[in-house]
Image (cartoon, helix red, strand yellow):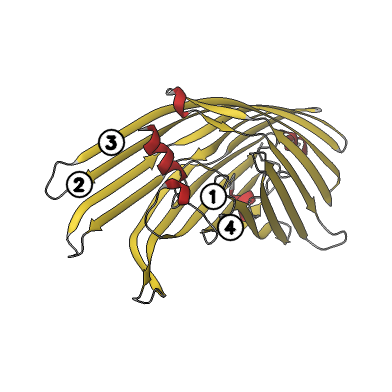
Amino acid sequence: MMLLMIVHLTLPGVMNQGDRVLCHDARSCALGNAMLVLEHSPNPSAMGLLEDMSVSISGAIISANEKRGLRVYDSYGNNIGISTITNTTFTNVLPCACTFVFPLQFIRTGFQFAPVRDYTYSFHREYRDDFYQVTKVVDQEYSGRTYAISPMIAVTHSWLNIGVAQRFMYGRREFREMIIFPDAPDSAVTDEHDLNGMNTRCGVLIAPDMHFRVSYMYAFAYVLECDDPLQHDSFPAQHNLGFMYQPPGRIPTRFFGEVACETYDDPVFVYKIGVEHTLQTSYALRYGFCLYPDHVQPAVWTTVLTVGCGIHQPHFSADMGYAYGKRDYTSANYNGLGETENLVFDESLNTFLLSFTVHL
């Protein structure tokens, strides 16, 4: 069973199977997932930007498509195309980040709920012989998410903000596989595990004026413990550096950038860039992109294009964000996993987020 889980968790064609959840809320989603210097973000020091008590809630609709194919060759060994062998699509409606911030003079206290890891994945394939007769049908389904509940505290003085958050993580991971044979007994495998862990984040944000912000956040390494000790998941420390710049004068445009480094054996860098245009002081148009590699196969890159909009009033704001992700397996090498077929993978992910914030 352990070998089966390892193979499935490291095979390509797994868009959400244990992936990090990049989209925090609708505004950060539309800005290429750049969120470090936004008021409602995982960075606890960003609470120093808020002067009023506020509540923010978010939800997401996620649709993923995975297509697997085989390279087709002619009798001379020339590649003449790709034959699709599976095409799987699934859609989920899920909660995203929810944040409560209470300011008290130079101290900010807050509470945040947010997803951390996503295990959702579905796979269906029919195997056929040379006469195109079905020899077996395989259905695999992964489900579950890991969430974090985080009490936060920050201290603000003039342009300097410092904050700390303690994340208490919990979740559940489930796996079900059904193999159906036309002329033999069917086979069924199930595997369910509860997950929990703790992680500390600390950050500093410098905002000397309304035109510039820069922030750094450090997240300590942590372990997602499982009721089966052999399936504990360890995740490394993470360094995050972000900034915002708005040209002085009457140009109502903000530029956001962020770089995150996850310290695996080989460092993994995540790049995020976003632009926000303000229209008539209350409306915003946003777009951006994000680029990140897979921590198992650094040669596998995912490109995410984002767009969104929002309306902001003195006591209320609403934001929408859409992200389209495409994973590139061109340079991947999975020879060590024992796959005998020359597979070609084509994955895409559509994420639509809504966020509502109330300032009290």
Specify few, some or many for label 1: CA neighbours under 10 Å numbering under 14, 14-19, or 20 or more. many
Q: CA distance from mark 3 to mark 4?
A: 34 Å
Specify few, some or many for label 4: CA neighbours under 10 Å numbering under 14, 14-19, or 20 or more. many
The residue identified by callout 3 is 189
Q: Position of residue 160 (x, y in %)?
A: 85, 35
> As drawn, is 319 to the left or to the right of 64?
right
The residue identified by callout 4 is 304
Chain-order first, disc 1 or disc 4: 4
Q: CA distance from mark 3 to mark 1?
A: 37 Å
Disc number at residue 180? 2
Q: Residue drawn 58% across and 45% down? A: 295
- Answer whether residue 295 is visible to the viewer in this image: yes
Q: Is there a contact, CB below 8 Å, between mark 4 and mark 2?
A: no
Instruction: Give the label, 4 or 2, closer to the camera.
Output: 2
Instruction: Give the label, 3 or 4, closer to the camera.
Output: 3
Chain-order first, disc 4 or disc 2: 2
Q: CA distance from mark 4 to mark 2?
A: 37 Å
